[in-house]
Amino acid sequence: MSEVTEDAVLCMQHCTNQMNIFFTKFPETCPVCGKTLKSCTLIIPPFRVPSPFVSQNNVSCLFMVKPTKGSFLRDYNSGENLHVGIAASNGLVYNFDELGLHADRADWEQCIVVSAPNDTHVSSSEQWDSKLQQMYSSGLWTSKEYDEHNNNCYDFALSFLNQILPANLEPFQKQDFCKDFIAPSTTKAAYYIDLYRRVQQGSGVSVERCRHR
């Protein structure tokens, strides 16, 4: 079972539609009114809060983001370093670090997917994989070429995307791509991380007023 499934956060309403009850394990009593929840009527039955995280086992041909150390839900703090990679059609994640460019079969079980711009959509997964293999075999992404600040995982991933762009388009720039594509995904994930940790701090339950829009 993947960590994403184990850490699922659920939500329901029991005695008032003004308060949401978030939980990871169904509570025996309502944390709002104190009544038992066994065989009770719920205003809104439990549903899973959509998670922004995915596992490499369930995706292909995508731009992936994870913390450099640990996992998003348990370890990551805002402002800490992130690590990025490119998922092939078979789930292998190609990423560049101190070891050079390598393809991982594990350790990408709790990641954010960055929605690639429409311009980077290729005609087939074979074309996507072929470009990854070309970069892997090029000899340009070795451990000797790695530099934490000037030639890192982000440089590799952005270089890959730029190589599959149509020739008539301008290449992506690091700051612009981060602002336009990475930041929106990490902002969404930050809300879920905060919710998950509030639930954990409340021994598996958190009661919060509804956010009406």
Image (cartoon, grey):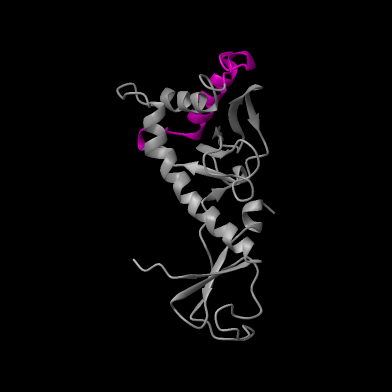
Residue 60 higher or lower than 94, as above or below: below
Q: In which quarter of the image is the N terminus?
A: bottom right
* Along the viewing direction, whichever of 125 and 78 lies nearer the viewer: 78
Report the magenta residues as a range.
118-147
**x 67%, y 36%: residue:** 105
173, above or below 47, in the image? above
The quadrant in which the C terminus is found is bottom left
Q: Residue sitting at 44 percent across and 28 percent down?
A: 161
Image location (x, y in percent) of residue 99: 66, 22
Q: Is residue 133 magenta?
A: yes
Q: Is residue 181 visible?
A: yes
Residue sitting at the far left: 168
Give the image location of residue 117, x and y in percent: 38, 37
- Any part of residue 121 in sight: no
Secondary structure mostly taken by the magenta-highlighted segment of the chain: helix
Residue 38, picture quadrant: bottom right
The picture places residue 110, in percent across and down from the top left corner, at: 60, 46
Residue 141 magenta-highlighted: yes
Say which of 60 and 80 sits in front.
80
Number of residue marks: 0
User: Could you tell me which residue is drawn at 61 percent across and 25 percent down?
Assistant: 97
Q: Is residue 170 left or right of residue 7?
A: left
Q: Is residue 91 left or right of residue 191?
A: right
Which sits in the foreground, 103 or 175?
175
What x and y, as percent, mark residue 192?
52, 55
